[in-house]
Image: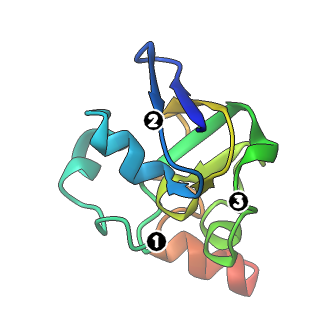
Amino acid sequence: MPTIRFEQEGQQVGCIEGANLRKAALDAGINPYKGFNNFNNCGGLGQCGTCVMEVVEGMQNLSPRSDIEQVYLADRPASYRLSCRTSVYGDVTVRTRPSDGAGKGSNSLVGALKSLVGK
């Protein structure tokens, strides 16, 4: 059984193999959203780019970045993932709500369009 360690919260939760990272966080009472994004998010449909988490350890135990993530996170480090688009297959440590994770750059609809057309 994979274990997800939420670094900032000091919590570890077990999950089934292939579990969705966002859902596992919410089920554990951990909020993946920051500020206004608590109310202004897509509910896990991969359409807003606000549930960003930074992978501290265990990137190899996650699903590869999806096409949606490639667009929304184009100007973010490879360790940043949209938790709603990430499946867990082994132990991983994540940092929720990184300070530069959401709300600017390509993880907004306008930013995503800019990254597709090249500014």
Q: Position of residue 98 (x, y in %)?
A: 52, 33
- Residue visible at 47% across and 75% down in the picture: 109
The outermost residue toward the front is 1
Residue 19 - label: none
Q: Which of these two is toward me, 19 or 6?
A: 19
The residue tagged 3 is 63
The residue tagged 2 is 97
The residue tagged 1 is 46
- Residue visible at 32% across and 33% down in the picture: 30
Res. 39 image quadrant = bottom left
Quadrant including the C terminus: bottom right
The outermost residue toward the right is 60
Circle 1 — which element? Answer: loop
Q: Amino acid at mark 2?
A: Arg
Residue 40 to residue 115: above or below: above
Q: Which of these two is toward me, 20 or 109?
A: 20
Q: Which of these two is toward me, 39 or 87?
A: 87
Q: Amino acid at mark 1?
A: Gly
Circle 2 — which element? Answer: loop
Counting other residues with Cα less than 10 Å from the Cα at mark 2, is it few (<14), some (14-19), or many (20 or more)? Answer: some
- Residue visible at 62% across and 37% down in the picture: 54
Counting other residues with Cα less than 10 Å from the Cα at mark 1, is it few (<14), some (14-19), or many (20 or more)? Answer: some
Label 1 to label 3: alpha-carbon separation: 15 Å
State if disc 3 and disc 1 touch (CB < 8 Å). Answer: no
Q: Amino acid at mark 3?
A: Ser
Circle 3 — which element? Answer: loop
Quadrant including the N terminus: top right
In screen coordinates, is 56 left or right of 32?
Answer: right
